[in-house]
Amino acid sequence: MLKVVAGLLNKHFSSEHIVARLGGEEFSVFFDDMSLNDAAKRLEAFRIELEQTAITSGKRNIKCAMSIGVTHATFEQLDQLLIYADELLYQAKQNGRNQLIAR
């Protein structure tokens, strides 16, 4: 699963973006000088492709879904920005999962 996700991250985001794995199943993408709308569009395209990608494990095909929180807020420190994006991620999960929340 991680190899597939990593391949899609590589496909959708260039060296201009900072992509990081924050924990087991949490990832972050930092967009410098990109509008919230443009960032949301890129992330939504990634989410849709991931959802449509069948991952084979042995004889099983596994479907993957992703909830995303994206923000364009300004904070003094990076950890504050990550906390706010994480709050948006949890809103997406509470609203039914497999969706993007942007503010």
Image (cartoon, rainbow, N blue to C red):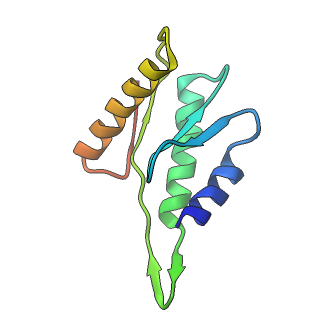
Residue lying furthest right in this view?
A: 15
Query: Which residue is drawn at the image coordinates 56% and 48% (left, top)?
Result: 45
Q: Quadrant of the C terminus?
A: top left
Looking at the image, residue 59 lies above or below residue 31: below
Image quadrant assignment for residue 101: top left
Residue 37: x %, y % from top left: 54, 28
Which residue appears farthest toward the left when viewing the image? 94
- Residue extending furthest top? 76
- Among all residues in the image, which is located at the extreme front? 23
Q: Is residue 58 above or below residue 28?
A: below
Residue at position x 44%, y 53% in the image? 24
At x 64%, y 23%, the residue is 34
In depth, the one of 58 and 65 nearer the eye is: 58
Q: Establish if 25 lies above or below 100.
A: below
Residue 35, image x and y in percent?
A: 59, 22
Q: How many marks?
A: 0
Q: Is residue 100 left or right of residue 13?
A: left
Residue 54, position as x, y percentages in the image: 52, 74
Q: Nearer the viewer, residue 75 or 41?
A: 75
From the top left corner, tell me how far across and down residue 1 is, in percent: 52, 67
- Which residue is depicted at the point 47% across and 62% down? 51
Q: Is residue 62 left or right of residue 87?
A: right
